[in-house]
Image (cartoon, grey):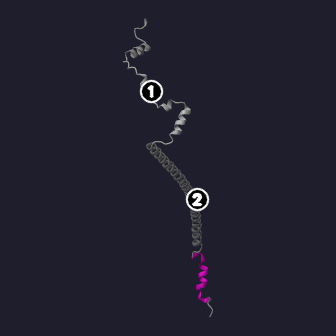
C-alpha cells in the first residue's frame, strides 16, 4: 500500500466483514432432534419393537387410507386421461387422413379444370380458324355465283321457244 493510497479490493472486503455485526452463538441443543428411545436403539431391537406394536394409531390409519384412496384416484384419472389421449390421437390421425384425401381430390379436380380450359382454348382456336376459312370460302362462292357470271343458265330457262308444245 506504499505505492498507492487507494486500498485493494481484498482490503475493502476485509474491512466490510469486520464491520458487520456478529450474530449470537447458538447452543448445540438447538440443532438436536428429539428422538424416542427406540430410534436410538440398535436395529434388531427396533424391529422387535415394531413387530410388538402391530397396531397403528387410528388417526394414522385414516391418514394412510386417505392417502391410498387419493393415490388410487390419481392413478385412475391418469389411466382415463391416457385412454382419452390415445383416442384423440386416433381421431387426429383420421382427420389428417381425411384432409389429405380432400386435398388430393381438390388437386385432381383442379387438374381436370385446367385440362378442360385447355381443351376449350384449343377448340376456340380451331373454331376461329374454321370460321375464317369458311368466311373466305363464302366470299369466293358469292363472287363465283353472281348472276352476271351465269346468265347462260338463266337464258335457257326463260326462253319460250324451247318449251315443248
Q: Tell me the residue at 62%/88% (across/down).
A: 162
Q: Nearer the viewer, residue 109 or 12?
A: 12
Look at the image and say whether residue 79 sits in the magenta stretch.
no
Element assignment for label 1 = loop
Q: Quarter of the image containing the C terminus?
A: bottom right
Residue lying at the far top in this picture: please name it. 2
Q: Position of residue 125 (x, y in %)?
A: 58, 62
Q: Tell me the residue at 59%/88% (across/down).
A: 160
Q: Position of residue 53 (x, y in %)?
A: 50, 40
On screen, 41 above or below 128?
above
On screen, 90 above or below 58?
below
Residue identified by numbered label 2: 108
Total count of labels? 2
Q: Using a 10 Å C-alpha cutoff, classify the residue at mark 2 as few (fewer than 14 neighbours), some (14 to 19) or many (20 or more).
A: few
Q: Position of residue 111 (x, y in %)?
A: 58, 58
Q: Nearer the viewer, residue 159 or 17?
A: 17
Left or right: 31, with 160 as reference point = left
Residue identified by numbered label 1: 32
On screen, 6 above or below 85?
above
Nearer to us of marks 2 and 1 is 1
* Quarter where residue 159 is shown: bottom right
Look at the image and say whether residue 157 sits in the magenta stretch.
yes
Q: Nearer the viewer, residue 26 or 58?
A: 58
Residue lying at the far bottom in this picture: please name it. 165
Q: Position of residue 38 (x, y in %)?
A: 50, 32
How far is disc 2 from disc 1 in space, using C-alphas? Answer: 82 Å
Left or right: 72, with 24 as reference point = right
What range is drawn magenta here? Answer: 147-161
Q: Earlier in the sequence, mark 2 or mark 1?
A: 1
Element assignment for label 2 = helix
Amino acid at each position: 500500500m506504499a505505492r498507492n493510497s487507494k486500498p485493494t479490493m481484498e482490503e475493502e472486503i476485509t474491512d466490510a466483514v469486520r464491520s458487520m455485526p456478529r450474530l449470537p452463538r447458538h447452543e448445540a441443543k438447538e440443532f438436536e432432534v428429539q428422538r424416542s428411545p427406540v430410534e436410538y436403539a440398535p436395529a434388531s431391537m427396533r424391529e422387535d419393537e415394531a413387530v410388538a406394536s402391530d397396531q397403528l394409531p387410528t388417526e394414522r390409519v385414516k391418514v394412510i387410507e386417505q392417502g391410498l384412496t387419493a393415490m388410487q384416484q390419481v392413478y385412475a384419472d391418469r389411466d382415463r386421461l391416457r385412454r382419452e389421449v390415445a383416442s384423440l390421437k386416433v381421431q387426429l390421425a383420421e382427420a389428417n387422413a381425411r384432409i389429405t384425401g380432400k386435398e388430393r381430390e381438390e388437386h385432381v379436380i383442379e387438374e381436370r379444370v385446367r385440362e378442360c380450359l385447355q381443351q376449350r382454348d384449343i377448340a376456340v382456336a380451331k373454331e376461329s380458324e374454321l370460321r375464317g376459312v369458311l368466311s373466305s370460302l363464302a366470299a369466293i362462292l358469292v363472287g363465283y355465283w353472281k348472276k352476271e357470271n351465269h346468265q347462260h343458265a338463266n337464258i335457257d330457262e326463260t326462253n319460250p321457244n324451247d318449251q315443248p308444245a
